[in-house]
Image (cartoon, helix red, strand yellow):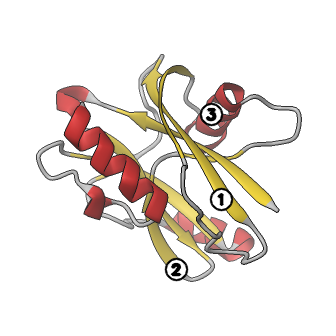
Amino acid sequence: MFSIRVYGILLGENKKVLVSDEFIRGNYYTKFPGGGLEFGEGTRDCLKREFKEEMNLDIKVMDHIYTTDFFQMSAFNSDYQILSIYYFAEALEPIRVPLRVKPFDFDEREMRVYELKKETETFRFIDWDVFSEQSVTLPIDKVVAKMVKENY
């Protein structure tokens, strides 16, 4: 079975890279914003929906960057193979969610969400000069981070 994921690379001022710090089922992950494709949805619509749900942010989906071209088993369910699709994204309005400076700097409200859903997230920008494949956790994100850093 497949899990199709769609992620956005959103560059802020001075080419800072937006990441999502997530606490899921007791584990910490730093990844690009985005999520799972729903039945009947196109990949670009999925990315717009995910940014709206996670950040209450309207975006414009820009150029396609990468689609997974190797086998990657899901970190959460070994019955699933992950297929991830990455696009550049542009914010169409100011970001209103709190942006953190430190990784995994969850506030009280975010930890209450974790208690209910067993997952929570927060967002931050990473300076271009320090951004690298080591900045993100998931294997496919690492490939994309390296690609973005080397080619853009």
| Residue 36: x %, y % from top left | 70, 49
Q: Quadrant of residue 17?
A: top left
Q: Quadrant of the C terminus?
A: top left
> Which is more foreground, mark 3 or mark 1?
1
Say above or below: 103 vs 115.
Answer: above
Q: Quadrant of residue 1?
A: bottom right
Question: Can you tell which mark lies on residue 27?
Answer: 2
**Whether label 3 touches label 2, CB < 8 Å:** no
Toward the front, the furthest residue is 70
Residue occupying the point 37% across, 65% down: 105
Q: Amino acid at mark 2?
A: Asn
Q: From this viewpoint, is residue 55 visible?
A: yes
Mark 2: give few (<14), some (14-19) or many (20+) Cα within 10 Å.
few
Q: Amino acid at mark 1?
A: Ile
| Residue 126: x %, y % from top left | 25, 48
Disc with the residue nearer the chain's start (3 vs 1): 3
Left or right of 53, for residue 64: left
Relative to the observer, which residue lies in front, 106 or 77? 77
| Residue 143: x %, y % from top left | 38, 54
Q: Quadrant of residue 24?
A: bottom right
Disc with the residue nearer the chain's start (1 vs 2): 2
Left or right of 61, for residue 36: right
Residue under label 3, please give it: 47
| Residue 150: x %, y % from top left | 21, 41
Labels in figure, total: 3
Question: Can you tell which mark lies on residue 82?
Answer: 1
Residue occupying the point 58% across, 64% down: 120
Say above or below: 115 vs 6.
Answer: below
Distance (Cα) linking label 3 and label 1 = 16 Å
Residue occupying the point 18% across, 42% down: 128
Q: From this viewpoint, is residue 109 visible?
A: no
Q: Amino acid at mark 3?
A: Leu
